[in-house]
Amino acid sequence: EPEVTQTPSHQVTQMGQEVILRCVPISNHLYFYWYRQILGQKVEFLVSFYNNEISEKSEIFDDQFSVERPDGSNFTLKIRSTKLEDSAMYFCASRDRGGAVLEQFFGPGTRLTVL
Amino acid sequence: EDKVVQSPLSLVVHEGDTVTLNCSYEVTNFRSLLWYKQEKKAPTFLFMLTSSGIEKKSGRLSSILDKKELFSILNITATQTGDSAVYLCAVPSGSARQLTFGSGTQLTVLP
């Protein structure tokens, strides 16, 4: 069964460093998302991506964040200068075409720890 | 702002018990409500509900939506230790149908 994959599973970085989190969505899906979950808190939406551009973003997704789909398969989230409060689990999700198909399928997540 | 509230926050039961998890929502333009199960890591999809009063069923799990009262319930019968997880309720909103999640219900099933 096709699935969303993410790498790395765990990333440890120093405050101020740049990190890139990688995702491979399900191959025929068209809509891509990043969410994060700070330990003990809700899953929160960061950004959505469709047709090679950001379609919507939350207040969390400030200038320190960027997303890219550099080729036909990968979808990346870059944090330019990490802060302690960026420590969280980051989930990538994808969904099929629009309309009534609203189920999103999640990857296993990348645990980011900022020291 | 769209809002999803789940109750209870946590629940401890014994194997064989039946549980009911609750989700209420406020959303500007309702399209559907989704239930996910989160064990160690990623949320895994359980159900999507769009129509009021129609039960969705998968094995021992079932769910129903009440669009008039703006809530949904997830029932698990004959619980097993493998059902221990956080159960998340979410609604799609915004132009990108991004999900707004509730805080989840932590279910622990004891042997």
Image (cartoon, rainbow, N blue to C red):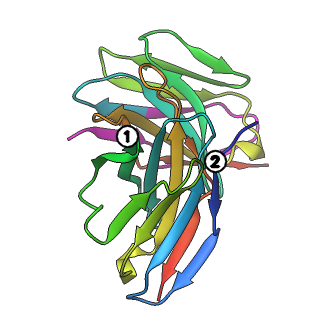
- Whole-angstrom CA distance, mark 1 to mark 2, is 17 Å
Q: Which residues are magenta?
A: B1-22
C-beta proximity under 8 Å, tags 1 and 2:
no
Q: Callout 1 environment at 10 Å: few (<14), some (14 to 19), or many (20+)?
A: many
Whether residue B101 can be seen here:
no
Task: Tell me, yes or no, whether the highlighted magenta stretch contains residue A10.
Answer: no
Residue at the far front in the pictured view: A71
Q: Amino acid at mark 2?
A: Val
Q: Which residue is mark 2?
A: A4
Residue at the image point whose x is 28% and y is 34% from the top: B95
Q: Chain of mark 1?
A: B
The front one of B19 and B87 is: B87
A104 in relation to B68, above or below: below
Residue at the image point whose x is 45% and y is 33% from the top: B22
Query: Relative to residue B34, is residue A111 drawn left or right?
Result: right
Residue at the image point whose x is 26% and y is 65% from the top: A62
Q: Amino acid at mark 1?
A: Gln
Task: Tell me, yes or no, whether the highlighted magenta stretch contains residue B4.
Answer: yes
Q: In which image quadrant can residue B7 be found?
A: top left
User: Measured from the top left, where is residue B18 in percent x and y?
Assistant: 65, 30
Q: Which residue is mark 1?
A: B98
Q: Main secondary structure of the magenta part?
A: strand
A103 in relation to A54, above or below: above
SS assignment at label 2: loop
Image depth: mark 1 or mark 2 in front: 2
